[in-house]
Amino acid sequence: MTLREVITASLTAVTDQIADIDAAIESATLRHAGAIDPMCAQNLVNHISTLNGSLIGLHNERARLEDILASEASE
């Protein structure tokens, strides 16, 4: 595989992971609305917070990979 193919495959994987995490956040948010007690609600908030942190990292990685592809195309 060429470097461009590796980066493109990585970009696709990161984009898929972003979609998966978005779905997980949506699901956890819905569950939070129906939490049975404060402890359950707090656990869901912690889970959502962790997912949001992962989402930020993935968005940064997607931007980095897109920048690499853009700089390679301009050369």
Image (cartoon, helix red, strand yellow):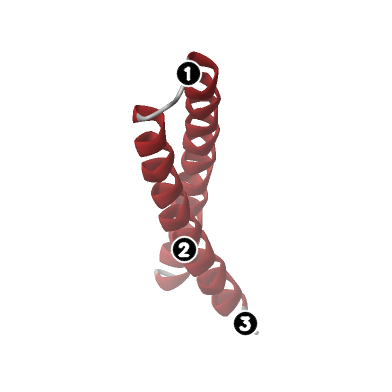
Q: Nearer the viewer, residue 56 or 50?
A: 50
Which is in the foreground here, disc 2 or disc 3?
2
Q: Above or below — where is 35 with respect to 56?
A: above
Residue 70, located in which quarter of the rendered image?
bottom left
Q: CA distance from mark 1 to mark 2?
A: 33 Å
Q: Classify residue 38 as left or right of residue 1.
A: left
Question: Which numbered tag is attached to residue 2?
Answer: 3
Are there few (<14), some (14-19), or many (20+) residues within 10 Å of tag 1? few
Q: Earlier in the sequence, mark 3 or mark 1?
A: 3
Q: Classify residue 33 as left or right of residue 54.
A: left
* Residue underneath mark 2: 16
Q: Classify residue 75 as left or right of residue 2.
A: left
Q: Amino acid at mark 3?
A: Thr
* Residue underneath mark 1: 37
Q: Amino acid at mark 1?
A: Asp
Horizontal and vertical percent position of residue 50: 55, 32
Horizontal and vertical percent position of residue 18: 45, 53
Residue at 42 percent of width and 72 percent of height: 73
Residue at 50 percent of width and 29 percent of height: 44
Q: Earlier in the sequence, mark 2 or mark 3?
A: 3
Q: CA distance from mark 2 to mark 3?
A: 21 Å
Q: Secondary structure at mark 1?
A: loop
Q: Secondary structure at mark 3?
A: loop
Residue 15, located in which quarter of the rendered image?
bottom left
Q: Nearer the viewer, residue 9 or 23?
A: 23
